[in-house]
Image (cartoon, rainbow, N blue to C red):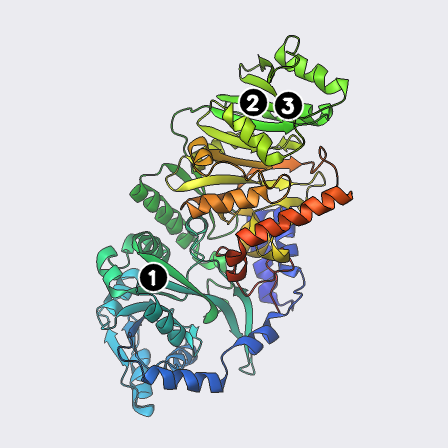
Amino acid sequence: MKITPYRIKKGVLYLKHYGPKAFWNRLKDKMESERVPYGPWFERHKAGSIELRQQAKLSRKLEKPPVFSIVVPCYNPNLDYFFELMTSLHEQSYGYWQLCLADASTSSRVEDLARNFRFIYDETRIYYIRLRENGGIAENTNSGMDLAKGDWIGFMDHDDLLAPNALYELAMAVIQDKEIEAIYTDEDQVEEKKDREMIHQKPHFKPDYSPDLLRSNNYITHFFCVKGDLLDRVGGFRKEFDGAQDYDFILRCTEAAKKVHHIPKVLYHWRIHSGSTADNPMSKSYAYKAGKRAVEAQLARAGERGKVSQLPHFGFYRVKYAVTGAPLVSILIPNKDQAGVLRRCMASLQKSSYQNYEVILVENNSTGQEIFSYYQELAGKPLEQGKTLLGQGSLPGGQAVKILRWEKGFNYSAINNFAASHASGEYLILLNNDIEIITKDWIEEMLGNCQRPGVGIVGARLYYPNNTIQHAGIVVGIDGIAANMFPGLKRGQEGYYHKAALQLNYSAVTAACLMVPKEIYEKVHGLEEKLAVAFNDLDFCLRVREEGYLVVYNPFVEAYHHESKSRGQEDTKEKVRRFGEEIEFVRSRWMQLIQKGDPYYNPNLSLKKCNYSLRR
């Protein structure tokens, strides 16, 4: 990255905002080398001239082609950039569109340029309205929508660009699926150099619709189009959210749409320059306050209680959901020997701010006397040898502790199902004995999420003891099955578009620390007992998702995971064979999903690396 006076000035502002430690972590994220450089990747993957001609030919054969009205509010744009915007519409391979310009500029230059463009290129699809006054971006955009005659309405900034195949890709998607009412694409940023060379950089490869990620950040942004019927139902942009008017609009549209569709192709190019939000987020600090209010408004519409706060990185938010009542939470912990490991786990639980929980320990063929002494210490009296209930007692805070005996061999799924059958709580926490909780209000964080309608599972951010990430969500398809995201990323770093530090949806989270309503656990018949050790959490989460529930990754629940201390390594022929059998079981059950691709990932991203690297 070239050092310039502007970047130095920008860096000083960021340093003041973030502080030295957070600034350094952010800088390391920015400076991390790309294994697959994006510029050449983009050139290889963009639509070529032959493909564009084929698209144009196919488009002309459509019986009822959908018409796209692209609304652009204008206010004193750079005329070169504005000319390039119009050119990017004129060069679309799909011809059924309308450009609606709502101009609040202080001079007639935009009007003159638009008129000349129409004349020179014989372009009849450009519509223009001169606004009497600048009503702000929301009202100006609404005025542009008054010009729209199309079936679909899309939105652009007055200095950005559409890829030449953008509208064709959208048209094919909405023709094939009539349920779609809102649609969005991937995007990147472009910067024009002095020699007018266009540099493509900072691609944003997005997941399919992720409602929790959308509450954390307006990841959809561009290119976003809505069906005219949906626009009629939700209304236009709202002036009170100026600066984040698109965020508020997208939140309202996605919650009301029959189906939200994502096209995983870079079809929108967001221009960056010193005054743009893309390059300098601090140029519009008022917008982030409006974004916070947009999320609060959506919570109110949904009837959900939560406190919204701005995160240190601009345009990103945290929703801390309120807990309703004080339901009993059952914490299920399988254990074999490792008295010191279990003591550490139990000690961290007892620092929890939430008090209404019980602990169910499942003893699984321990051999050392030390662990039985600890069990007896927890029970407060001698253990009941030969019985299923070895003992029960209370923690210093009054929480019940039950110690159950599991005499069969190690089977993580069966042990947890056994523990769940003895649980009294409305909510279950599956917890490994080698977990050490960091976050004091971790139960409230998980419970507030788990009580939300439509949420089935909540997971946590886990670290190795050396303060690097062990788990920050699970993506299906990596390494042929699935893998944890961001392993080895240092604590404090946040990864690709801050995803390690945002509340969002994944297909799965680890059962080393997750919460699930007991009702849902029982509905899917618990963990799959054919998966004794590996992938039982993946399979469980996917079956919960099949029932229509969301899996939420909550990075604000943090814990250390002293991984696999109890069961040891996969270092025997029997363990290796069992592991292979479990891989084949999961691959067979979930082959369709593995082949199709994880909806919360992106097909342009690597299936070999776990850090959102580009796929070659």
**Residue identified by numbered label 3:** 347
> Which residue is more in the foreground, 424 or 189?
424
Q: Residues within 10 Å of mark 3 (few under 14, many from 20)?
A: few
Q: Secondary structure at mark 3?
A: helix
Residue at the (60%, 28%) spot, across then down: 333
Q: Give the foreground label among 2 and 1.
A: 2
Quarter occupied by the C terminus? bottom right
**Residue identified by numbered label 1:** 182
Establish if 434 lies above or below 96.
Answer: above
Establish if 26 lies above or below 152.
Answer: above
The CA span between labels 2 and 1 is 45 Å
> Which residue is more in the foreground, 322 or 393?
393
> Which residue is more in the foreground, 281 or 405?
405
276 relative position to 138: left or right: right
Identify residue type, mark 1. Ala
Residue with the most extreme top position: 381
